[in-house]
Each structure stands twice: as structure tokens, then as C-alpha cells.
Amino acid sequence: MSMIAELNMTDTENMNAIPSFDDDGAHVIVFGNEKGGSGKSTSAMHAAIALLRLGYKVSSIDLDARQGTFTRYLKNRWDNVIRNHTETPSPLHMAIERSQLETVEGQKKEERDFLMMALDELRPCCDFVVIDTPGTDSYLSRLAHSCADTLVTPLNDSFIDLDLLAHIDPVTHEIIKPSIYSHMVKEQQKIKQSGSNGITTNWIVMRNRLSHIDAKNREMVGQCLETLSEELGFTLVTGFGERVIFKELFLQGLTLLDLKENREKPLTLSEISARQEVRHLINAISPETIKGYIKPPKNNSGASVQKSND
């Protein structure tokens, strides 16, 4: 049985169509992966700020409110703005927690209602909504996947993380069959199509934590991902390398695209390379083909600071 045929056997019994949105509303970008530690929040933050600095109106939603990495990243940013009296652009942000109701049906309804209310409020006033999801399988995460116009799946460059997409033969390294997350993505793409006049989700897989050493393992993982991209229909892009700078910026609430304005010393070669990695992600999202070209704010810092009322 081919991989596509197996994916088409996905259970569709519970495929309730999502609400159809106005084509003129915001483009929803979901960062999703059922495995933690893949860099979803860091990638989501950099994408949101990059889009803001290109002149687009951007909002964000954190569906992993219990861990809250994306929300804390933005809080650190707002604290930085207040502390240093800067006008660093920030997205309008919301955080949605998992329901604590007693029944499963009640939980699903409450989570669905909160997410739909958030999207109903944000989509008319923004160009892009960036959503960060939990690193686990949950109803709220699946719901977000079904709302995605673009799905970005950060993946650490290892066979451990690759197992989330497909089962790999340990001897030949051939792809045996798609794995749990691939099945879930295809299922949610069908739901998306049913509620969006046949428009499906653009799926991007980004290889994060790439080693700077051209190791044999890196080559084998790359070959498997190239094959999977054809079989599963996703776009494969080079993601963020294993760089200390990504971890250091979290406490300041800054991204690599903010560095020129927030310090006097010039960028290092490593930081310049890391900025290029962010551009690779934005090029893959291709905002200009979705919303057209927007004139960037003057000096790349003219976007208003939008802060939640939390």
C-alpha cells in the first residue's frame, strides 16, 4: 500500500467542518508538532516579529498556556519595552488554556468556542495570526491544525524526531509508513478543505537544530525528509541551527531581527547567519504572495506596540 493510500484511510468520522472565514481575513499560521523541544515557540516568535517588521499587521495566540513559553517570551518583550523606553513592535496577543470542565464534550465545546472567538476577533483586523500549539496531542491542538492556512512543523534534525512523521527501516533507512503526526495533519487538512471551499493547508517542515558538522546522520535524515516531502506533500526548509543566541534572546524578549536597534556593537558572523535562517522561514511562508507587498515601517521600527491587557 502506498503512503498516500494509507493516509487516505484516516478515520473521518469526527470531521466536523470548521467555520468558513472571509477570504479577506488574516492568514492563519500554526506552529505545530506533537513533540516538545522542537523550537515551536522560538520559531513562532521570530516569524511574528519578522512579519511585523515587513509592515504586516500581526496577532498571536498561545494554545500552550500551561507552559506558556510563547506568552512569557512576549511578556519579556513588553517588560523590555517599558524598561528601555523603546518602540519595539509586538503582536496583539492572546493565550487560551485547556478547559477544566468535567466532561469531555464540555471541554471540547469550551475550547472550540474560545479559539473561534479569538479568531473571529483577530482575523478582521490583522494580516496574519500566528498560533503556537502544545507539544502534545490534544483537541485544542488538532482544532488549531484544522484552522491553519499555513502549518509550520519545526523538527529537530534526528531520527528520533523524524519518527513523528514516518516509521523508518533501521537497516535500509527506507520509509515504511507514515506515523501518527502525519496522519493527524492529513485528517485536519481534510477538515480544513471541507470548511474552506476546497482550500487546503500549506504544510512546511523546517529542520531545526542542524549540526554545523556535515555528519553522516545529518545526510541520512536529509534524504529521508526529501523523500517524505514528496510523499506527504510538504515543503522542506532549512530551519534554525543549534545556536546559543536563540536561548539568550528569550529573557530579553528579543529576536534576531531586533538586535541592530537594541545594542551598539555590530552583529557577529553567527548572528548574521542566524538572521538568514529566519529569512529562509519567512521566504517559505511567502507573505507577499498571500497578502501582497506592504511598505515596511520607517527604520523597521514603526509598527505600534500592541500589548494584551493581562
Image (spheres, rainbow, N blue to C red):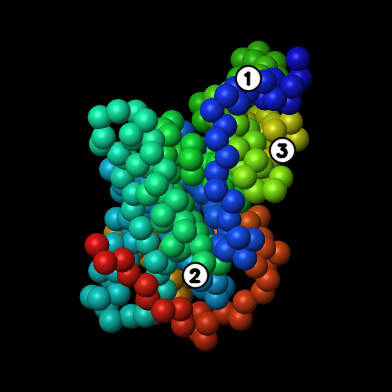
Q: Is residue 97 above or below residue 287?
A: above
Residue 186 got which mark? none
Give the image location of residue 278, x and y in percent: 55, 59
The relative height of residue 156 versus residue 248 in the rendered view (above or below) is: above
The residue that mark 2 highlights is: 125
Query: Which of the two discs, 2 and 3, labels the residue nearer the N terminus?
Result: 2
Mark 1 vs 2, N-terminal side: 2
Q: Quadrant of the C terminus?
A: bottom left
Query: Looking at the image, can residue 238 be seen?
Result: no
Q: Is residue 300 left or right of residue 63?
A: right
The residue located at (51%, 26%) in the rendering is: 160
Left or right, 142 with reference to 68: right
Which secondary structure, mark 1?
strand
Sequence order check, earlier mark of 1 and 3: 1
Tell me, yes or no, whether the two marked residues, 1 and 3, touch with CB atoms within 8 Å: no
Whether tag 1 and tag 2 are in contact, CB under 8 A, the answer is no
- Asked where in the image residue 227 lies, by quadrant, the reply is top right
Q: Please name the residue that numbered disc 1 is placed on.
A: 168
The residue lying at 28 percent from left, 62 percent from top is: 75
Q: Nearer the viewer, mark 2 or mark 3?
A: 2
Seen from the viewer's position, the closer of residues 137 and 72 is 137
Mark 3 lies on residue: 233
- Percent of width and height locating residue 176: 67, 17
Q: Position of residue 92 (x, y in %)?
A: 39, 66
Image coordinates of residue 242 in percent, x first then y, are 47, 47
**Which amino acid type is marked by label 1?**
Ile
Q: Residue at x 46, y 33 (%)?
A: 34
Q: Residue at coordinates 37% horizontally, 49% vertically from top-left?
A: 114
Q: CA distance from mark 2 to mark 3?
A: 31 Å
